[in-house]
């Protein structure tokens, strides 16, 4: 039978032990780049290119949006499964380290897929009215790949983070 | 009750109608005989009872008292493989192997009765199901043991 | 001798305790247990460790279910490594280790006949890389150029100075070196291990009863669970009354899990017997109305559907059919089939706080890990999936429906390990069946017997849409149209369209999937066209393949030659032929049969051949060919799952018949690798069997069977 959609509560439990959650939340101000903080944050990229579909490079994904502005891999946090048994509905949460004041806030947040037929999976307009630059959703993935969360700040600079997701292949599908 | 399993006396206290298969597997941790159907259709559960192949999933444990039960684990003696086991290796008979414990025991019983079985003898005796389809090699291996002339 | 410590069923905690006291200095940094007391076994890369005594440990990252890959895949590593196979020991790479190392072992799913073809490049590279590092280490030690050194049989040699060092002596130094970025892989003609019929490493443990399958997991304090889900598809538990059994000997608990009921006891038989007397009232709604006849009506309606998904559209088929000299039509049907692996579905799980251990027979350990973690509500890195041998996979043990059940039970019984075993009846009635399929063919030929147009319309369920819930490109399920949309014939006008007709009957990947049924229909229809054109079936195929598909042509000719097609046959014996591709390989089959007036089919010989590109272990391939014939014939003669009152009617081997040894025909295996590509072996061999057989039956009896199983056409298998 198809796997059931995982209740959000159970999934959060699955991704983080309680102590890891607190430690990590506390650490997000100092966390930079791709330092691994356990399962919840971003593992280094090692996409397995065995599923069909062209894999875009990071430049392919960022350049059309960033268009020459400064882009730094820091301050953006992703929480998702490292391993998904099925690409149908993978939980995904992003938040950006930002005071979200009128002077300093996130204006836009993109979710980019390395492999899906449509690269820009989601785009959100944000502003100081939100209070926190965060959103969570479920994404559908056409196989294991990197997902990029890209944020534009009010300064015009960009911040991003990369998550490496493994999606196992379920069946005897010929040729793929 | 006491059972003689692979030349060892084992004690157990279970319902008399518990199938021998589950007494062996779950009570005595003898995992060689396997569960495939529970209705004596497939033979994965085959054990030798006083040398005769029996489908242990449908044989009450109480009836095994006072009998010599031999499972696949008990076939080799003192680390020396039984000739049928050796033939199974020589001819690369098993695929997944789940049914093979039963197959080997039935072959042993056949060869003890008929050291030089004909194809008809093999047809009649080897009724266990093999889902992987190793039948051709089972036949070859049995003939090979017969040809060697060793005692089964 | 291989070591299967991970399959003894010991809890990981227990094992680490043992190893710490018995092996002083043994590195506990390794996540998985390894036999051997080397304090630090140098790891040249994820796949290879070499011990001081020259033992080479090669990791195998997929599963073993009889297809032999646990031996063949490491052969790929060993060959490039220039290892001494006698010193090779194969150990499993585990899902949790794969997760921890960010998938250093790649894909672990053992499906799609793709272990060898998908992993051969990185496995060979792993071997070659390690070999270069060992050579470099020796060269450094000797102070000579690496180019003057060679490696063979586990040793590095420097011919000029007549010096040698075994891998065991070099491993520590080699492991410290940086791996070369580029390595050159051997030319196939230089292979020393690949291509040899090496004995399978797990067979000795099989014949002695030492091997451990998922069902054999044994954990201290373990309980057993028998389960029952609604026999009517999509039903749920409405009410449950366990009062009759709750206080019975050995019964621990009766669980109402909503979708199923589980009886937990201290012995599986007690659980199963008690389950029979738990009064379960199932909420089935309208689902109890479904019948095989209704399903057939649904498929027929699909045939007449206005909107269809188009899988292939070359030229203008409708027009070409209108102008062809000779047009024939036929409708074919193949039924639902159950997997019936010899070992039914099992899952042993133990939830201890936030840590979960799972022992199961799975074709996809990573999926087991992900689903187990989510079901138990624990972090993925706290889940250990212990590798076990599978008592058959056949595509059933890749979906995780049964492991999810097992973990749900373990969660309800938190702290206690529970082994869930499905009865054969539960297994047969809660399968993910090979879909039934109704296919209509319309073929148009010119006066020379050249096919000008072929229209194939499929009305069938979609595995990809229902089981995997994948979006279908242009609405086409590739499995439903497999071997139709990619047929190899040189036909100027081809139209393949598809009506997706899902039913309550859950469908999944049965061995050979779409190629388990479509080639039967295609190659039988090809014969029908050949007959209508008055052509020999082989000549007709060769003419219509033309130059378009050389590999299809080659295997067809190889098998025809091996079967002496066209040569004399005893009176009453007739031949049938078929060819197809699948899983990257090319296959063909010739059957020789006689058919009595009463419909007894005597199969005198099956000649079955495959071109898998490269044959890694020929003896193993022969075994797969022989086994595929048995698997196929059982389905062809007797296999069908019928639906009545919303449920499957068949329940055990008495009404889902399996072939037995006395019915086994003579099989001649033709292994004809042409090189230059890597094709699968586990599944493709089954594909050309049904059409070759049915074509032979048609030649012998004049009876064209367009619907399986054969028993429904009054045909029986004569032993």
Image (tube, coloured by chain):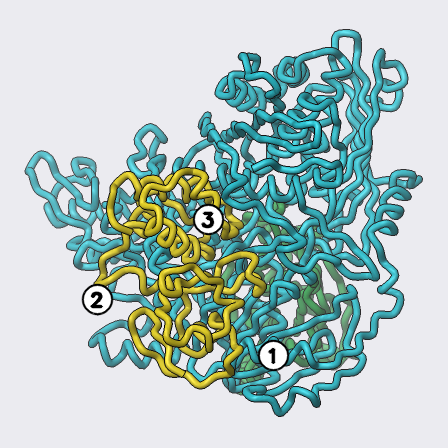
**Can you say whether C398 is above or below C162 in the image?**
below
Q: CA distance from mark 1 to mark 2?
A: 39 Å
Q: Is residue C202 left or right of residue B149?
A: right
Where is residue A161? Give x, y as percent. Answer: 59, 65
Q: Which mark is residue C38?
A: 2
Secondary element type, mark 1: helix
Q: Which mark is residue C273?
A: none
Q: Nearer the viewer, mark 3 or mark 2?
A: 3
Task: Identify the residue under disc 1.
Answer: C409
> For mark 2, does the 10 Å Cα neighbourhood hold few (<14), some (14 to 19), or many (20 or more) residues?
some
Instruction: Indicate the position of residue C405 as horizontal and vertical percent values.
Output: 63, 72
Element marked by disc 3: loop
Disc 3 to disc 2, C-alpha distance: 46 Å
Give the colour chain B carries in the figure: yellow
* Residue C703, quarter of picture: top right
Q: Measuring 67% from the left and 72% from the top, which residue is drawn there? A: A93
Marks 1/2 in contact by CB < 8 Å: the verdict is no
Task: Compare residues B146 and C581 and report the one nearer the observer.
Answer: B146
């Amino acid at each position: 039978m198809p796997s059931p959609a995982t209740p959000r509560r159970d999934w959060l439990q699955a991704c983080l032990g309680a102590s890891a959650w607190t430690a990590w939340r506390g650490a997000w101000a100092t966390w930079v780049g791709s330092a691994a903080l356990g399962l919840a944050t971003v593992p280094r990229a090692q996409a397995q290119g065995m599923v069909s579909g062209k894999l875009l490079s990071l430049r392919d994904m960022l350049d059309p949006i960033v268009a020459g502005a400064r882009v730094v891999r820091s301050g953006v946090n992703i929480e998702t499964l490292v391993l998904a048994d099925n690409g149908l509905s993978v939980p995904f949460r992003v938040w950006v380290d930002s005071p979200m004041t009128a002077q300093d806030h996130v204006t836009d947040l993109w979710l980019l897929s390395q492999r899906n037929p449509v690269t820009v999976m989601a785009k959100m307009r944000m502003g100081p009215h939100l209070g926190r630059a965060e959103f969570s959703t479920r994404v559908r993935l056409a196989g294991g790949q990197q997902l990029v969360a890209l944020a534009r700040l009010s300064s015009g600079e960009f911040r991003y983070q990369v998550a490496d997701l493994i999606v196992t292949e379920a069946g005897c599908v010929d040729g793929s | 009750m006491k059972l003689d399993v692979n030349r060892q006396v084992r004690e157990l206290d279970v319902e008399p109608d518990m199938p021998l298969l589950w007494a062996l597997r779950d009570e005595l941790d003898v995992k060689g005989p396997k569960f495939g159907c529970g209705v004596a259709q497939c033979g994965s559960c085959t054990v030798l009872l006083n040398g005769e192949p029996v489908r242990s999933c449908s044989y009450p444990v109480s009836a095994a008292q006072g009998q010599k039960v031999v499972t696949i684990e008990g076939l080799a003696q003192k680390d020396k493989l039984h000739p049928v086991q050796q033939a199974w290796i020589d001819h690369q008979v098993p695929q997944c192997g789940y049914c093979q414990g039963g197959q080997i025991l039935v072959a042993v019983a056949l060869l003890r009765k008929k050291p030089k079985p004909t194809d008809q003898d093999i047809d009649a005796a080897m009724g266990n199901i093999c889902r992987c389809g190793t039948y051709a090699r089972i036949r070859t291996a049995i003939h090979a043991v017969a040809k060697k002339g060793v005692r089964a | 001798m291989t070591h299967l410590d991970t399959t003894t069923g010991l809890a990981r905690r227990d094992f680490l305790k043992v190893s710490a006291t018995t092996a002083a200095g043994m590195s506990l940094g390794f996540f998985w247990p390894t036999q051997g007391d080397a304090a630090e076994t140098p790891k040249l890369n994820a796949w290879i460790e070499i011990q001081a005594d020259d033992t080479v440990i090669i990791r195998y990252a997929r599963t073993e279910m009889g297809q032999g890959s646990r031996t063949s895949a490491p052969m790929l590593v060993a060959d490039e490594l220039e290892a001494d196979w006698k010193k090779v020991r194969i150990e499993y790479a585990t899902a949790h280790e794969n997760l921890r190392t960010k998938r250093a072992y790649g894909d672990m799913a053992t499906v799609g006949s793709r272990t060898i073809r998908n992993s051969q490049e990185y496995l060979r590279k792993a071997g070659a890389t390690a070999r270069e590092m060992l050579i470099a280490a020796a060269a450094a030690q000797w102070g000579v150029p690496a180019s003057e050194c060679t490696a063979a049989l586990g040793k590095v040699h420097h011919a000029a100075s007549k010096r040698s060092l075994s891998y065991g002596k070099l491993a520590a130094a080699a492991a410290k070196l940086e791996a070369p970025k580029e390595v050159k892989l051997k030319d196939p003609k230089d292979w020393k291990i690949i291509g040899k019929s090496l004995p399978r490493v797990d067979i000795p443990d099989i014949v002695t009863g030492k091997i451990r399958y998922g069902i054999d997991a044994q954990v201290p304090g373990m309980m057993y669970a028998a389960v029952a889900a609604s026999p009517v598809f999509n039903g749920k538990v409405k009410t449950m009354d366990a009062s009759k059994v709750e206080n019975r000997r050995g019964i621990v608990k009766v669980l109402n899990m909503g979708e199923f009921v589980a009886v937990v006891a201290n012995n599986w038989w007690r659980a199963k017997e008690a389950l029979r007397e738990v009064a379960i009232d199932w909420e089935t709604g309208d689902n109890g109305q479904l019948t095989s006849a209704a399903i057939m009506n649904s498929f027929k309606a699909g045939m007449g559907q206005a909107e269809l998904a188009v899988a292939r559209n070359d030229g203008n088929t409708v027009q070409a059919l209108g102008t062809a000299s000779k047009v024939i039509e036929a409708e074919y049907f193949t039924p639902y089939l159950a997997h019936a692996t010899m070992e039914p579905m099992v899952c042993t799980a133990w939830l201890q706080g936030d840590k979960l251990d799972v022992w199961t027979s799975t074709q996809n350990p990573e999926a087991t890990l992900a689903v187990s973690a989510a079901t138990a509500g624990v972090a993925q890195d706290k889940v250990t999936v212990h590798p076990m041998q599978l008592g058959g996979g056949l595509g059933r043990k890749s979906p995780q429906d049964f492991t999810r059940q097992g973990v749900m039970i373990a969660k309800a019984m938190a702290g206690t390990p529970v082994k869930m075993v499905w009865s054969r009846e539960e297994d047969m009635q809660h399968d993910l069946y090979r879909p039934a399929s109704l296919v209509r063919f319309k073929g148009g030929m010119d006066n020379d017997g050249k096919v000008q147009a072929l229209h194939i319309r499929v009305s069938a369920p979609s595995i990809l849409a229902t089981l995997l819930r994948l979006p279908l490109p242009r609405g086409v399920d590739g499995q439903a149209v497999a071997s139709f949309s990619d047929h190899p014939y040189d036909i100027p006008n081809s139209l393949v369209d598809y009506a997706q007709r899902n039913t309550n009957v859950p469908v999944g990947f049965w061995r050979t999937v779409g190629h388990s049924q479509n080639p039967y229909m295609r190659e039988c229809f090809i014969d029908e066209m050949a007959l209508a054109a008055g052509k020999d079936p082989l000549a007709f195929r060769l003419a219509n393949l033309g130059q378009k598909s050389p590999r299809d042509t080659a295997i067809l000719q190889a098998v025809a030659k091996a079967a002496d097609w066209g040569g004399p046959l005893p009176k009453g014996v007739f031949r049938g032929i078929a060819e197809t591709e699948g899983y990257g390989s090319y296959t063909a089959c010739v059957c020789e049969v006689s058919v009595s007036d009463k419909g007894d089919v005597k199969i005198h010989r099956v000649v079955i051949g495959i071109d898998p590109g490269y044959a890694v272990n020929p003896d193993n391939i022969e075994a797969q060919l022989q086994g595929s014939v048995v698997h196929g014939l059982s389905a062809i003669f007797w296999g069908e799952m019928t639906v009545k009152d919303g449920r499957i009617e068949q329940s055990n081997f008495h009404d889902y018949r399996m072939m037995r040894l006395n019915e086994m025909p003579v099989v001649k295996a033709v292994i004809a690798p042409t090189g230059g590509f890597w094709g699968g072996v586990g599944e493709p061999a089954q594909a050309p069997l049904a059409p070759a057989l049915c074509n032979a039956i048609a030649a012998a009896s004049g009876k064209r069977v367009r619907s399986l199983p054969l028993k429904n056409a009054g045909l029986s298998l004569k032993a």
